[in-house]
Image (tube, rainbow, N blue to C red):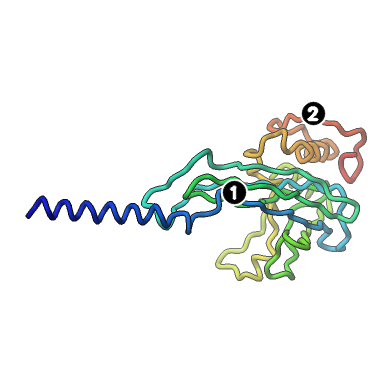
């Protein structure tokens, strides 16, 4: 009787495994997906005036996670940086990150983004319009506010990544979270995962702001500066 029970148990296990393989495609993320475009308008948070020539870097990340039908992660290809676009805002403060094809061959991975890094000389952090409960860059797009910095010292501290943050302790409400500034302490701190050739204008704008404010060039960036003139608005 023991061999019969073993054979029966083996058949049950094989049936369950085949069933899970059959039903994986129904619940897995699409390996190829068209997304975008993503649109935004960057404005001064105080005056609501459009900000021209703000540099916007949108980037995507691929993360490894669990899959509901697999007891183990199954992944093809690297995780982390998964593509980026660099654009500047037009005279009306508008930008467009073009549509892209997101290829994700893993069964237990997801591609998130676009994550944003935004820099404009004389400004600090950014946030989506806090009056909008669920902001989105899809469709008609969303409004992004930037925090004006009113003194040269504020600008020096910000571009050096040393601006003090007035963070409040305790649990924040969704309303309070919407009012928080992103990258408030300095330019985006984790953009180093984006290849340097994909963020040239972003790095140049930071370097010219540092030059304008009498600071030494940032040793991490080392970018070839292609501007022809320095103004209070940054690089031209």
Say whether residue 232 is left or right of residue 10. Answer: right
The C terminus - image quarter:
top right
Q: Which mark is residue 70?
A: none
The residue depicted at 47 percent of the width and 43 percent of the height is: 75
Mark 2, Cα crowd under 10 Å, few <14 / some 14-19 / many 20+, is few
Which percent across, then down, holds residue 98? 75, 49
Which percent across, then down, holds residue 170? 55, 66
The residue depicted at 70 percent of the width and 34 percent of the height is: 196
Q: Is 55 or 21 nearer to us in this picture?
A: 21
| Circle nearer the viewer, 2 or 1 | 1
Mark 1, Cα crowd under 10 Å, few <14 / some 14-19 / many 20+, is few
Quadrant assignment, res 136: bottom right
Q: Earlier in the sequence, mark 2 or mark 1?
A: 1
Q: Could you tell me which secondary element the residue under label 1 belongs to?
A: strand
Which percent across, then down, holds residue 94? 84, 55
Say whether residue 76 is left or right of residue 211. Answer: left
Q: Are marks 2 and 1 in contact (CB under 8 Å)?
A: no
Report, in whole angstroms, how far the alpha carbon at label 2 lies from the one at label 1. 36 Å
Residue position for label 1: 32
- Report the number of numbered marks: 2
Which percent across, then down, holds residue 120? 81, 48
Quadrant assignment, res 67: bottom left
The residue depicted at 58 percent of the width and 50 percent of the height is: 111
Q: Residue furthest left?
A: 1
The N terminus - image quarter:
bottom left
Q: Is 231 or 19 nearer to us in this picture?
A: 19
Q: Could you tell me which secondary element the residue under label 2 belongs to?
A: loop
Say whether residue 77 is left or right of residue 134. Answer: left
Q: Is 48 or 84 nearer to us in this picture?
A: 84
Residue position for label 2: 224
The residue depicted at 40 percent of the width and 56 percent of the height is: 69
């Amino acid at each position: 009787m023991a061999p019969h029970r073993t054979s029966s148990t083996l058949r049950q296990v094989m049936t369950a495994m085949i069933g899970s393989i059959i039903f994986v495609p129904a619940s897995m993320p699409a390996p190829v997906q068209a997304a975008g475009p993503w649109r935004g308008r960057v404005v001064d948070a105080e005056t609501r005036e459009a900000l021209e020539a703000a540099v916007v870097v949108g980037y995507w990340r691929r993360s490894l996670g669990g899959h509901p039908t697999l007891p183990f992660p199954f992944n093809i290809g690297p995780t982390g940086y998964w593509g980026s676009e660099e654009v500047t805002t037009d005279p009306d403060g508008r930008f467009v990150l073009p549509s892209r094809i997101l290829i994700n061959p893993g069964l237990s991975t997801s591609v998130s983004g676009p994550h944003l890094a935004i820099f404009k000389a004389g400004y600090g952090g950014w946030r989506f319009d806090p009056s909008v409960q669920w902001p989105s860059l899809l469709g008609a797009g969303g409004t992004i506010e930037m925090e004006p910095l009113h003194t040269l010292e504020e600008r020096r501290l910000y571009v050096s990544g040393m601006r003090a943050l007035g963070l409040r302790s305790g649990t924040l409400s969704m309303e309070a979270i919407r009012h928080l500034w992103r990258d408030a302490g300095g330019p985006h701190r984790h953009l180093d995962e984006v290849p340097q050739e994909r963020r040239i204008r972003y790095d140049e704008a930071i370097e010219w702001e540092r030059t304008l404010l009498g600071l030494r060039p940032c040793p991490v960036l080392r970018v070839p500066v292609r501007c022809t003139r320095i103004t209070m608005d940054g690089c031209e």
